[in-house]
Image (cartoon, rainbow, N blue to C red):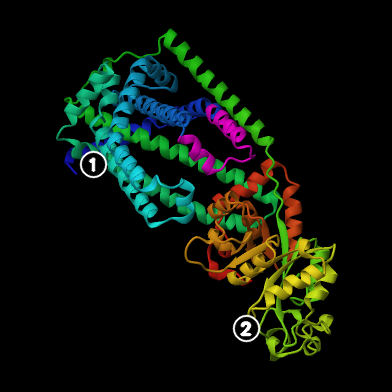
Amino acid sequence: MTSLSLEILPKSLSDLAVRWRTPILFRLLMQLLGIAILTPLFTWVARRLVLASGEPVVSNYDIARFVLTPGGVAFVVFVAAALLGLVLAELLGHTWVAGRAYARREASLLSTVAFVLRRLPALMILSALVFLRLALLALPFLAVAAVVWFGTLAGHDVNYYLAESPPEWRRARWIAVALAVGWAFTAAWQLARWIYALPILAFEGAAPWTALRRSAERTRGRLRHILAPVVLWWTAITLAMAALTWLGRQVTDASFDWAGLDVQRVLPLVALFMAVAAIGALVYASLGLAGQQFLVVRLYAGQAGGEHGYGEFPEPVDPASRSLARTAILATLALAALSVGIGTLIFSRLDLRQAVDVTAHRGASLEAPENSLAAFRAAIDAGATYVELDVQRTRDGVIVVAHDADFMRSAGDGRRVADLTAAEIAAIDIGRKRGERWVGERAPTLEQAIDLARGRIRLNVELKYNVPDPGLAPAVVDLLRRKDFLDQAVITSLDYAALKQVENIDPAIVTGHIVTAAVGNVLRTEADFLSLNTARATGRLVREAHRLGKEIHVWTVNTPDAMLRMVERGVDNVITDDPEQLVRLMRERNALEPAEILGLRLRALFDEPPREVTEPAAVQPL
C-alpha cells in the first residue's frame, strides 16, 4: 500500500468520526424508502402466486416457474434496477456528506436529501447506464448458460434434475457457479473503473455519461492505488462485525438456555436481539458505505490536486430545496409506515398453527416398559395419534411385539425371539427391570395390541427383521385384514423389499420407509412416507417431499426444543418416547397468537440448535 493510502485512511476516518450521524440517518431513510417501494410490489406478486398455485403457501418451485415467465423476468429486472438505484442514491448522499466534511462544512440529513433530490434526474440516468452496462456484461455468460441448458438439460423437466441430481445436472451447476463468479469479477472490475463517477457527478456537475467516462479515464492505471484503502476499510469493519457477532452469539446462547421455551421469556429476548441485530446491520452498512465514500472523495480530491471547490460549493438548502426535502422525508416515513401496516395486517391473517401427528415410540416408553400394553395405554392417555411398535414372529408363527432379537436388555433373558414359542415369551417378565410397579408386564402379541388400540389410537407397525423371515410381512397384513384394522394402521420397515411385499399384497396399505443412512435420493422410494433421523430431515428435504406428495416422519425426538424445531421444519409426524410432553407442547404452541409463534420460530436465528437436530449420531435409534 502506498504512503498516500496510509495518509488517507486516518484523515477519512477522522472526517467520518465527526459526521457519522448523518450517514446513519441517511441509511435508515433509504432503507425505509426501499420498504415503501418494494413491499407493496412483493406483496402483490406473492398474492398473484398464491392465487395461481391454489395453495396457502408458495413454494420455491412456484417462484422458479414465475421467474421463468416474461412477467417474472420483467419483475426481476425492475427489482434489480430499483435496488441498484437505491444503492447509488445512498452512495451519492454519502459522497455529498464526505465532500462537506472534507471542506469542513456542515451536512445535515435535510441538506443531504435536498442535494440528492437536486441530482435525482442525473442519478436516474446514471443508474440506467450502469444497469444497462452490467446487463450487457452478463449477456456472454447467459449465452454460455443457455448453450449448457439446451445442449445438455433441455431433454427433461427441471424437477427431474432437482430430484435425481444426475451427473449432467451436477456438472451444469458447477458451470453455473463458474459463470456467476466470472460475471461477478467482470462487473466488479467495471464498477471499480467508475468509482469516481459519483464524486464527479456531485462536485463537477457533469452529465451522467460524462461522469462515467471521466472516471474511467482518471482510474486508468491507478485502480490498485485507489482500491487498496477501500478494501482495507471493508476488511477491518467486517472483521470487527464478525468479532462482535461471535460475542453476541455467546450472549444469545446463554440467554436462550435460561429462557428455555417459556414464551414469556423467549419473546422479549427475541425482540431485544432482533432490535440489536437490526441496529448492528444498520451501523455496519452505514459506516461501511460511508467510510468507502469518504475514502473515495479524498482520493478523488487528492488526484485533482487537493482542492476541488468544495468550500465554494453552494449549500443546497434554500427554502425551496428545504421544503422539498422535508416533504420527501415525511412521504417516505408515511409510505414505510403504511407498508409495514399492510404487512402486519396480512401477517395477522396467517394461520401459523400446525397439525402434527404424535407417535409414541414403542408406546410411552419413558413412562412404562417399551413395547408393553402398559406403554400403549400410557400413549393413549397422553393423546398420541399413533403407537409405534416392533413385530417379529415366534418359532410357532405368532406375531409378537418386541424390538431386539432377544430379551436380554428388557428382561435379562438371552433367549432369542425366533427360538421361542408364544407361550414361552408370555412367561417372560419385561417389567421387573423397570421397577416394582411394572412387575408382570409381558411382551404382547400384535393381536393384543390391536384389541387395545381399536378406536383409541392408530398403530405404526414396524417389521423387524432380526432374522430373515420372508413370511413376516404377509402374516402381518393377513392379521390386520382379519382384525379389520388396515385403515387404522401403517406398516414401516428398514427393509424396502418387505414394504414392496406389502404393497404387492394390498397397494392401499400405507407404508413408510425407515431410512437411517442412504446413498442417493431418499425421495425416490415408492413408500407413502419417509421415516427419518431428525438431523436428516432438513427443511429443504421436507419441502421437496411434500411437493412429491410424501409425508416426513422423524425420530426419536425427546426434548422440547428439538420437537419445536421439527414442527417448524414442517414435518408431518414426530416420533417420541414422551408423547405427553409433545402433545402438551403442541397444544400450548397452537394456542399462541401468530406473532408469538413467529417469535418462537425466530429464536432459531440466535440460538444454537440441539445436537439431535444437526448430528445424526446424536439421535436415539428407532
Q: Which SS does the magenta portion mostly show?
A: helix
Q: What stretch is highlighted in magenta?
A: 41-68
Residue 283: x percent and y percent? 44, 38
Magenta stretch encompasses residue 374: no
Q: Which of marks 2 and 1 is nearer the N terminus?
A: 1
User: Residue 228, which numbered label?
Assistant: 1
Provide the secondary structure element on which disc 1 rests.
Answer: helix
Residue 186: x percent and y percent? 26, 38
Q: Residues within 10 Å of mark 1 (few under 14, many from 20)?
A: some
User: Residue 467, which numbered label?
Assistant: 2
Task: Identify the residue shown where x is 46% and y is 12%.
Answer: 324
Task: Identify the residue shown where x is 41% and y is 31%.
Answer: 80
User: Is residue 433 left or right of 158 when viewed as pictured?
Assistant: right
- The amino acid type, in three-letter code, at marker 2 is Val
Residue 404: x percent and y percent? 66, 81
Q: In the rendered image of this protein, does residue 465 appear above or below residue 350?
A: below
Q: How crowded is mark 2: few (under 14 residues within 10 Å), some or many (20 or more)?
A: few
Residue nearest the observer in this picture, 369 or 153? 153
